[in-house]
Image (spheres, grey):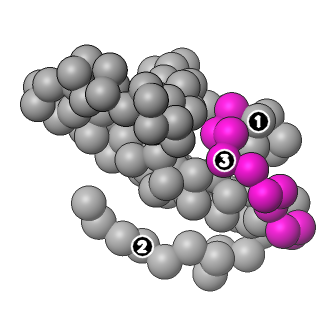
Amino acid sequence: MHLATEKMIKALYEATTKEIPPKTHNLVSLLGKITLNVPDEHLKTIESLNDISIVTRYPADIKALVKAFNKDRAEDYLQKTKRVLTLQRHIDYPDSNFFFRCEM
């Protein structure tokens, strides 16, 4: 979920700035570098995905994360992430061919 969101934000970064995005996994930092109105619901999801991803990079914390994420919570994050990924569909780009249309 984090990786898909990261790729989408990096694509938005490149589409809006015409520059290669910085090498970072911090979703909030990436989003802060582009001018984009993100609905609060999406921003909260992005912030949560950012926090969760940091934990998964450290094996000592993975057991606690697995314990905290039951099937319902994981499904909730999956649905929220799918909604975040639709964000790119609602933006006008200088290069209209930058994104191809994909359905989820």
Q: Secondary structure at mark 2?
A: loop
70 lies above or below 95: above
40 lies above or below 37: above
Disc on the earlier residue, 3 or 2: 3
In three-dimensional space, the C-alpha distance between marks 3 and 2, rounded to whole angstroms, equals 25 Å
In three-dimensional space, the C-alpha distance between marks 2 and 1, rounded to whole angstroms, equals 26 Å
Query: Foreground mark, 2 or 1?
Result: 1
The image position of residue 33, as x and y in percent, is 84, 41
Q: Secondary structure at mark 1?
A: helix
Crowdedness of circle 3 by 10 Å Cα count: few (<14), some, many (20+)?
some
Residue for badge 1: 29
The numbered disc on residue 25 is: 3
Q: Secondary structure at mark 3?
A: loop
* Disc 3 + disc 2, Cβ < 8 Å: no
Residue shown at the point (32%, 20%) measured from the top left: 64
Is residue 32 toward the left or the right of residue 103 in the image?
right
Is residue 25 toward the left or the right of residue 8 in the image?
right
Answer whether residue 39 is visible to the viewer in this image. no
Give the image quarter of residue 67: top left
12 lies above or below 68: below
Answer whether residue 24 is visible to the viewer in this image. yes
62 lies above or below 20: above
The image position of residue 104, as x and y in percent, is 26, 60
Give the camera-side residue of 55 and 59: 59
Residue for badge 2: 101
**Magenta-tinted stretch:** 18-28
The image position of residue 82, as x and y in percent, is 33, 46
Give the camera-side residue of 85 and 6: 6
User: Magenta span has 96?
Assistant: no
Give the camera-side residue of 83 and 61: 61
